[in-house]
């Protein structure tokens, strides 16, 4: 079985961690930048006039968490096929932490699943 991203001509994403910048402004347009571990910008999330700034910041947090989502989702899949229920529980817990972080929550993963992040 071929791993994801190993097809000929396929590139790997910029290694994490990715960081979310503070809110910046260019003229009248606020934006957030997501940078890779080398400090180079990976994405800029701009605020169109009809959008709420908090929605754009939430989008930027989600983009910044992408490498962690990828790593932890792969760990869940690997543990799912393993023999240890403990490893699966740990992997699911770590994935829950990433979900809460991307949502901008200070909640535990259990709180997030219960709907506490709404």
Image (cartoon, rainbow, N blue to C red):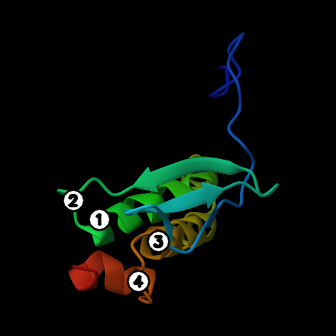
Q: What distance separates the C-alpha of mark 1 from that of mark 4? A: 14 Å
Q: Closer to the observer: label 2 or label 3?
A: 2
Residue 3: horizontal and vertical position, in percent? Answer: 67, 27
- Please report whichever mark, 1 or 4, sits nearer to the chain's N-terminal start: 1
Q: Is tag 3's residue or tag 1's residue first in the polypeptide sequence?
A: 1
Nearer mark to the viewer, of 3 and 1 = 1
Name the mark nearer the viewer: 2 or 1: 2
Q: Closer to the N terminus: mark 2 or mark 4?
A: 2
Q: Around disc 3, counting alpha carbons within 10 Å, would you say few (fewer than 14), some (14 to 19), or many (20 or more)?
A: many
In the picture, the disc for residue 105 is 4
- Residue on which disc 1 sits: 55
The earlier-in-sequence mark between 4 and 3 is 3
The residue at 71%/21% (across/down) is 6
* Left or right for 96, reference 72: left
Q: Does residue 82 appear in this view?
A: no
Image mark count: 4
Image quadrant for the N terminus? top right
CA–CA distance in space, label 2 to label 1? 7 Å
Q: Nearer the viewer, mark 1 or mark 4?
A: 1
Instruction: Identify the disc placed on residue 51.
Output: 2
The residue carrying mark 3 is 96
> Tag 3, which secondary structure?
helix
Of residue 56 and residue 91, the one placed in the foreground of this image is: 56
From this view, report whether residue 104 is shown above or below residue 19.
below
Q: Nearer the viewer, mark 2 or mark 4?
A: 2
| Secondary structure of residue under mark 4 | loop
- Verify CB contact (< 8 Å) between mark 1 and mark 4: no
Residue at 58 percent across and 46 percent down: it is 81
* CB-based contact (under 8 Å), mark 2 and mark 1: yes
Residue 16 image point, x, y percent: 72, 55
């Amino acid at each position: 079985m071929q791993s994801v991203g190993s097809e000929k001509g396929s590139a790997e994403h910029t290694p994490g961690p990715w960081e979310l910048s503070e809110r910046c402004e260019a003229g009248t347009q606020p934006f957030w930048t997501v940078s890779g571990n080398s400090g180079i910008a990976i994405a800029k999330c701009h605020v169109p006039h009809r959008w709420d700034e908090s929605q754009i910041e939430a989008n930027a947090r989600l983009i910044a968490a992408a490498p962690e989502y990828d790593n932890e989702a792969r760990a869940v899949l690997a543990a799912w096929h393993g023999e240890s229920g403990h490893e699966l529980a740990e992997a699911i817990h770590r994935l829950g932490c990433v979900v809460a972080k991307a949502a901008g929550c200070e909640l535990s993963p259990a709180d997030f699943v219960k709907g506490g992040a709404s």
